[in-house]
Image (spheres, rainbow, N blue to C red):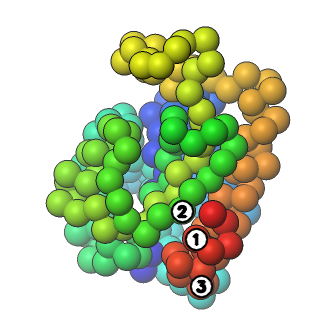
Amino acid sequence: MKLIVGLGNPGKTYAHNRHNVGFQCLNYFARLHSIRFDHRQCQARVGLAEVRGEKLLLAKPGTFVNLSGQAVACLVHKHAIPLSDLLVIYDDLDLPLGKIRLRQSGGSGGHKGMNSIISALASEDFPRIRVGIGRPQAVQQPTSEDAIVNYVLSDFSPQEEATIKPVIAKVSEAVDCFLTQGIEAAMNRFN
């Protein structure tokens, strides 16, 4: 079984925030494949399905982003999922808006949700898709922690929304490629 996790904060207040682009990507993928998040496991809303011949578990942690590791580690252990079959989708300040990057492994890049997952799994060796949200333009480097928090917890502007919508569809294609051909093929095609 493969586990695809989207990172975001639970609740309607956060639904369209930049920090919730992982949830948005996972929701889009789920709609395409008629998967419903109709179960709760390990502090996460999950959907089970078979997609492209692969048993698949989609998960949206019900913890806040910074505590995502609790839910992810629980699901990995509960379903005995090899880390190579875990894929995490999340926002990245250091990528320009609308860019995506797939990696086979690596550090958190300062993303607190990824820090939590890496710590809970005691490993950086799992695939991920980073979705660029860019940095706030009005604030010069170095950007204060408060400015970053306010930025990631704000909604995309209408112009940004127009940029991010097709990217969410592209992430879904990358997930399909990961499922059928593996992370290296997906990296070659989408990076």
Mark 2 secondary-structure assignment: strand
Callout 3 amino acid:
Gln
Whether residue 109 is visible to the viewer of this picture, yes or no, is yes
Which numbered disc flags the more N-terminal residue, 2 or 1? 2
Mark 1 secondary-structure assignment: helix
Say above or below: 120 vs 138. Answer: below
Disc 2 packing (10 Å; few <14; some 14–19; many ≥20): many
Disc 1 packing (10 Å; few <14; some 14–19; many ≥20): some
Which residue is the site of mark 1?
187
Mark 3 secondary-structure assignment: helix
Q: Which mark is residue 181?
A: 3
In three-dimensional space, the C-alpha distance between marks 3 and 1, rounded to whole angstroms, equals 10 Å
Callout 1 amino acid:
Met
**How far across and how far down the image is residue 131, in percent?**
58, 47
Q: Label 1 near label 2: C-beta < 8 Å? A: yes
Residue 23 lies in what quarter of the image? top right
Say above or below: 130 vs 189. Answer: above
**How far across and how far down the image is residue 78, in percent?**
25, 69
Which residue is the site of mark 2?
102
In three-dimensional space, the C-alpha distance between marks 2 and 1, rounded to whole angstroms, equals 5 Å
